[in-house]
Amino acid sequence: MKKLMILLLMFSFLPAAALALEDGVYRDKAAGYGGDVIVTVIVREGKMTELTTENTGGEKSEYYLKAEEALAKTIIEKQGIDGVDAVAGATGTSESILTAMKGILEQAEYTGAPLGTVNRMVENTADGVEITITDEDYDALVPPEGR
């Protein structure tokens, strides 16, 4: 019994496992001030490598830029949105980015399908286009190793 308790205590201090994500480019949007906020994330080798945002309203205010810079860095570092807080002074934009990220993480969740058996529907909510990715399409979408 003591051994079990010790093991449980040891595992309770381990960090949460990172999400397993499918390689690809993912986009989602959320309502923001002066237009929608569109977030684009690139996943390579199961990890988020790049996060960018755009404001359909055109200009990016200083508050928008503050939220964009801080959240992009933190989300990439944490490989998710768990424990990521809104940026002080840019709460509205932060919430828009985090809402879009939730949709992206749902889209990018790894299904466990081996390469060559991909056949799933992805809805690009940024512009309402639905795309079906088949086995043949997948090889064309994933860049060769080293890129």
Image (tube, helix red, strand yellow):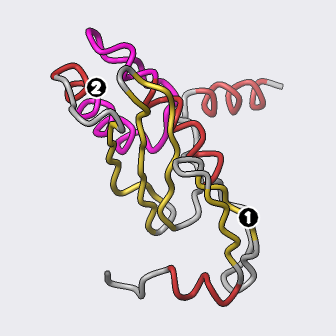
* Residue depicted at 66% across the width and 55% down the height: 123
Q: Position of residue 84 (x, y in %)?
A: 43, 25
- In the image, which disc is placed on residue 67? 2
* Residue depicted at 84% across the width and 25% down the height: 1
Q: Position of residue 96 (x, y in %)?
A: 45, 26
SS at circle 2:
helix
The C terminus - image quarter: bottom left
The residue tagged 1 is 121
Q: Is residue 91 magenta?
A: yes
Amino acid residing under circle 1: Met
Closer mark to the observer between disc 2 and disc 1: 1
Q: Position of residue 118 (x, y in %)?
A: 72, 77
Q: CA distance from mark 2 to mark 1?
A: 31 Å
- In the image, which disc is placed on residue 100? none
SS at circle 1:
strand
Q: Is residue 115 above or below residue 105?
A: below
The region drawn magenta spans 67-95
Q: Earlier in the sequence, mark 2 or mark 1?
A: 2
* Residue depicted at 69% across the width and 33% down the height: 7
